[in-house]
């Protein structure tokens, strides 16, 4: 039965019952109205309104749950769907809403995957050009400077040596940027080696110590999952180094009950009331691509605590 007919018949039943009591019962209305009659009519009206309110509340409760779900839904943090309850249009509305959420999450996952993999392809291209084109050019400049320095008169050798050191520093910086854009060690030696290189090669401010606990006996994750884990770890380490003001950063990768767990903790300022920025949303989008669960919170020492749980089934992520 539709919602309209259920509400209509409910009110009709209440009104018919009230009319039958007035017609067939001993209750009469005099003119002028007697106090007892007024009290009886007021009680009857209150009873009718109470019955209507109770039954309508029960009938429309599923719609209120859907309304709350609509106001709190976040496609980057999937939650259980509203339970299909009620009858007629109410149940159909909840089912339609759940189907819409499924479609939106699938479309968002597809578009995010295309954007992120296109971004990785562009990073790979830029890293290759930096390494092959700019890196080789600066290497040639460095060799030429070394040759000229050996032939230059004594007064110019110190200046040329200084230029040579500046050039060598620029070449090292270009190589570091290329490795951050596309870590070759990840493709060649795997995730553990890439995270080790990340923790050792990242420039850290004075007073910050990076501790790592990386297990080597881990279930296979696959290329895409390893890249996601690395990028999330890279984002966490970068945020801590730049903004946290921490003294200790802990980077761990271990086997968990469901698969593999990445955890990055520090004793810095923490997340606090900071609104979710592009970096955090990018981490959530990457986690959704591989079906992983990303938890961002505050650690026991007050700093940030980021945990990524990557499920592994049938021997791979």
Image (spheres, grey):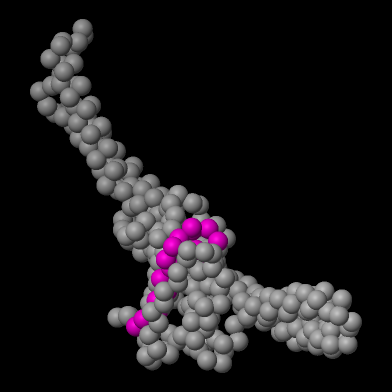
- Residue at image point 79% right, 84% down: 142
Left or right: residue 148 versus residue 17 is: right
**Picture coordinates of residue 118, whole percent (x, y):** 65, 77
- Does residue 269 lie above or below 317 as drawn? above
**Picture coordinates of residue 110, whole percent (x, y):** 57, 74
The answer to whether residue 3 is seen in the rendering is: no
Between residue 77 and residue 148, name the one nearer to us: 148
Between residue 14 and residue 240, name the one nearer to us: 240
Left or right: residue 264 versus residue 148 is: left
- Residue at image point 87% right, 76% down: 155
Which span of residues is magenta-colored? 240-255
In the rendered image, the quadrant that contains the N terminus is bottom left
- Residue at image point 48% right, 82% down: 196
Q: Quadrant of residue 34?
A: top left
Left or right: residue 205 versus residue 51 is: right
**Picture coordinates of residue 306, whole percent (x, y):** 42, 66
Q: How many labels were placed on the picture?
A: 0
Query: Furthest-left residue in view?
Result: 26
- Does residue 272 lie above or below 78 as drawn? above
- Does residue 27 lie above or below 231 as drawn? above
Between residue 304 and residue 47, name the one nearer to us: 304
């Amino acid at each position: 039965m539709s919602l309209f007919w259920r509400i209509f018949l409910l009110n009709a039943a209440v009104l018919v019952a009230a009319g039958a009591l007035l017609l067939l019962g001993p209750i009469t209305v005099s003119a002028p109205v007697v106090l007892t009659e007024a009290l009886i009519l007021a009680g009857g009206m209150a009873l009718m309104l109470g019955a209507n309110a109770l039954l309508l509340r029960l009938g429309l409760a599923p719609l209120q749950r859907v309304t709350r779900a609509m106001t709190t839904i976040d496609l980057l943090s999937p939650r259980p769907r509203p339970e299909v309850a009620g009858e007629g249009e109410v149940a159909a509305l909840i089912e339609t809403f759940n189907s819409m959420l499924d479609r939106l999450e699938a479309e968002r996952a597809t578009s995010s995957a295309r954007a992120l993999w296109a971004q990785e392809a562009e990073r790979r291209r830029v890293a290759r050009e930096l390494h092959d084109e700019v890196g080789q050019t600066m290497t040639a400049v460095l060799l030429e400077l070394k040759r000229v320095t050996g032939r230059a008169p004594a007064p110019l050798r110190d200046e040329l040596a200084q230029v040579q050191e500046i050039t060598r520093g620029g070449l090292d910086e270009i190589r570091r940027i290329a490795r951050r854009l596309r870590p070759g060690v990840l493709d060649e030696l795997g995730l553990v080696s890439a995270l080790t290189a990340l923790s050792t090669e990242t420039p850290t401010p004075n007073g910050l110590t990076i501790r790592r606990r990386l297990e080597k006996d881990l279930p296979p994750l696959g290329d895409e999952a390893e890249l996601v884990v690395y990028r999330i770890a890279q984002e966490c380490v970068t945020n801590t180094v730049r903004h946290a003001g921490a003294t200790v950063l802990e980077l761990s990768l271990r086997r968990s009950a469901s698969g593999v767990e990445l955890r990055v903790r520090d004793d810095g300022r923490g997340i606090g009331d900071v609104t979710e920025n592009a970096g955090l949303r990018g981490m959530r989008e990457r986690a959704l691509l591989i079906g992983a669960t990303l938890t961002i919170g505050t650690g026991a020492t007050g700093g940030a605590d980021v945990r990524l749980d990557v499920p592994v089934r049938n021997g791979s992520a």
